[in-house]
Image (tube, grey):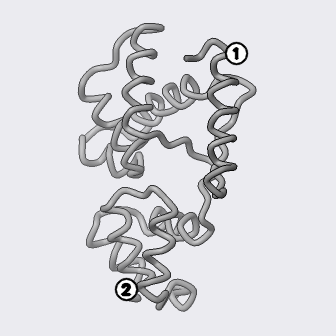
Amino acid sequence: MEQTALYKKIPPSRFDLLAERQQFAPKILARLRRVLVDGDQVSDVAEAERVSAEAIRKQVRTFLAGTQTQDLYLTETQFNDLVQRYGEAFRPLSAQNVGRAKRVLVEREQIQSVADDAKIDSTTLAKVIRKLRSFAVPGGWRQVTVVLPDDLADQVEKMEQDARHRAGLN
């Protein structure tokens, strides 16, 4: 039996506040809204959306926690820069793999879901994503997501730019 009581009835205003603070793809937000606001069963949403219930549960936990610690996600600009740098360093990715990687790294879709849509093995796509993620973050670096006042956020962004410049990553 599902523990839906943990997922039910977040007021829509609270959901919207949490959604603003995170960068989930619209499709995932709609799925989360069904579970967290409307109170739909995870298994029903999973079946309707053709994704695993476990993937939805992980998205719910991540959404409610407000952080994403294991995965590196990028803005569209960062992604385009990464694909170009990766292509220059190794060999260019196919247009299909760029599109699939973008869905995972920018739009935050699950690897399995993207692989299923493309009718390819998820392991193959996971390797592409792993290569891009490892290339995006240099060794000894890590991505940290924080919420700060504007003046402190400006300082942190400046620190990142300075560190990238010193490391020759700009």
Q: Residue furthest front?
A: 151
Rendered position, 58 above or below 89: below
Judged from the image, the secondary structure of the residue bearing numbered disc 1 is helix
Residue kind at label 2, given as amino acid type: Asp
In the image, taking residue 163 as reference, residue 64 lies left or right, namely left
Viewer-side residue, 87 vs 74: 74
Mark on residue 116? none
Q: Residue at x 69, y 49 (%)?
A: 152
Q: Nearer the viewer, mark 1 or mark 2?
A: 1
Where does residue 89 sit, x and y in percent of width and height? 47, 8
Q: Residue at x 62, y 68 (%)?
A: 65
Label 2 Cα neighbours within 10 Å, binned few <14 / some 14-19 / many ≥20: some
Which quadrant of the figure has residue 38? bottom left
Which quadrant of the figure has residue 102? top left
Judged from the image, the secondary structure of the residue bearing numbered disc 2 is loop
Q: Which residue is mark 1?
A: 166
Viewer-side residue, 129 vs 137: 137
The alpha-carbon separation of the residues under discs 1 and 2 comes to 50 Å
Q: Which residue is mark 2?
A: 40
Q: Residue at x 39, y 22 (%)?
A: 83
Instruction: Tell me which label, 1 or 2, sits earlier in the chain.
Output: 2
Rendered position, 140 above or below 64: above
Residue kind at label 1, given as amino acid type: Arg
Viewer-side residue, 111 vs 166: 166
Viewer-side residue, 6 vs 63: 63
Label 1 Cα neighbours within 10 Å, binned few <14 / some 14-19 / many ≥20: few
Where does residue 155 sit, x and y in percent of width and height? 68, 41
In the image, taking residue 57 as reference, residue 68 lies left or right, namely right
Q: Residue at x 68, y 15 (%)?
A: 167
Where does residue 59 sit, x and y in percent of width and height? 50, 64
